[in-house]
Amino acid sequence: MDFFDFHHHYKNINYGIYNLEFGKIPPEFYYSIGIHPQDIHLENIEYQFDWLNSNITENCFAIGECGLDGLISIEQKIQEQVFKRQIEVSNDFKKPLIIHCVRKFYEVISFRKFANQAMIIHGFNKKQSIADDLLKNKFYLSFGKAVLYNLSLQNVLKTTPLDKIFLETDNEDFNIEELYIKVSELKGISLEKLNERILENLETIQHG
């Protein structure tokens, strides 16, 4: 059985969504493309958006990573402007958004009203109350390696509806199958059923 990796940084994984780095050429399989908050260069921002818009091909599954990061030096107002523009790109091209968020969850939630497409928080590893607020606002949550050992996060995952879940390796070097096995145990469902549900979720966010 093959297991879809919702967000990864490795070109040797072609059953999943590859995170295309700024300035690179899109691969021949599913990828996401965006301007990460850390990559924002104000003096070159129009060039960055030209690159983004001109590389949205048939294999582009999503816009991202994009979002807000409370730990970097780029001014929040600038981050928000760039995030909002990428939401507009997502609306124009009818692509879901893969969100990078660090310590700015409620600010990200406030942008939900601008998006016509699905918004997925990648690498979610926060507490139950944040998960609840995101789910209430129709976000999806993509979980990574931390689920294998973080008991608190395992409890969050147990309460997250199956139709709002994705699984990913991100930039961690481990086999996505381990994560699927763990989540099927936590959810008390078969591996086949979990795999089927995730593929249904992909279909939902891709076609609405």
Image (cartoon, helix red, strand yellow):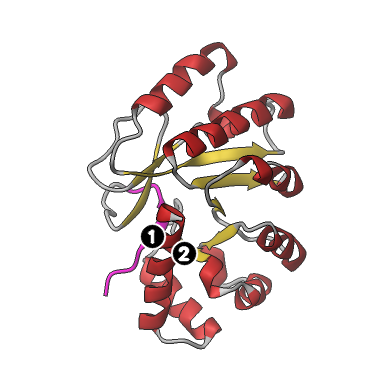
Q: Which residues are drawn in magenta?
A: 1-10
Q: x%, y% of residue 52?
A: 42, 28
Horizontally, residue 114 falls left or right of residue 204, namely right
Q: Is residue 168 above or below residue 47?
A: below
Q: Main secondary structure of the magenta part?
A: loop
Marks 2 and 1 close (CB-CB < 8 Å): yes
Per the rendering, the mark at residue 5 is 1
Residue at the image point whose x is 58% and y is 45% from the top: 100
Is residue 173 at all visible to an observer of this figure?
A: no
Disc sitting over residue 167 in the figure: 2
Q: Which mark is residue 83?
A: none
Q: Is residue 136 visible?
A: yes
Where disc 1 sits, the SS reads strand
Task: Quarter of the image for the N terminus: give it.
Answer: bottom left
Is residue 178 depicted above or below 38 in this figure? below
Q: CA distance from mark 2 to mark 1?
A: 6 Å
